[in-house]
Image: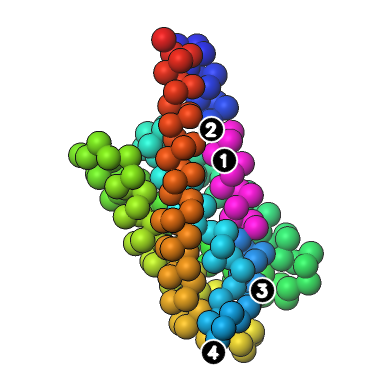
Amino acid sequence: MRMFKTINKKILLFLVSLQIIVITTSNFLVSIPIEFYGIKLTWSAFSFPIVVLAIDLTVRLLGKSIARATIALSYPFAILSSVAVLLVDGLGEQDAYRIGFASATAYGISTLLDVYVFQFLRERYSYWWLAPSISTVFANIIDTFVFFFTAFSNSNDTFMAKNWIEIATNQSIIKITIGLFLFLPFYGILLNLILKRINKNDS
């Protein structure tokens, strides 16, 4: 049991660090718009799907109560580090705080969905891929539109303010595609390795 608790602490530290790093990176990348064959995006479309799967992994491995504590611990550090990185990068103070606040709002909604809605699927069905697949689709759509509306609907950045709906739509499609076809298989491999490690040390 002592070893199990030790592994849990390691898992806890890993998941907290993962969420802080990915959220901070994504909030930096969201300030950089790109256009790919006429499709308007930001670079965060390629990194943020990891957050959804990290939240799902946290809830699955540690349960609701510990997951809430993990996410609560990650939350303020991720937002503060995001704002700091954006300010150092030269983004205006108002826009940096708007992105930080928008990220906090979207992250909170994703977390609540995962802990209270998608957990029902985990408890009821034994398929490991079902809950993360559904959360990848719906959580990405919801948190993307919440984020872009909060961050850019009345932003000083005229390009983002004008195109945020189109960008949010494109981001959602890209994030879902990447999440399902790239990160979900990695999630399955990582989950299997962690569970084997826990079972080995708990036996």
Callout 4: helix, strand or loop? Answer: helix
Tag of residue 12: 2
- Pointer 4 local density, CA inside 10 Å: few below 14, some 14–19, many at least 20: some
Amino acid type at mark 4: Lys
| Residue that appears at 43% across and 70% down | 173
* On screen, residue 5 above or below 32: above
| Residue that appears at 72% across and 60% down | 84
17 is within the stretch colored magenta: yes
Tell us which disc is closer to us: 1 or 3: 3
- Pointer 3 local density, CA inside 10 Å: few below 14, some 14–19, many at least 20: few
Q: Which residue is mark 4?
A: 162
Callout 2: helix, strand or loop? Answer: helix
145 is within the stretch colored magenta: no
Question: CA–CA distance between discs 1 and 2?
Answer: 6 Å
Q: Main secondary structure of the magenta part?
A: helix
Span colored in magenta: 13-25
Callout 3: helix, strand or loop? Answer: loop
- Pointer 2 local density, CA inside 10 Å: few below 14, some 14–19, many at least 20: many
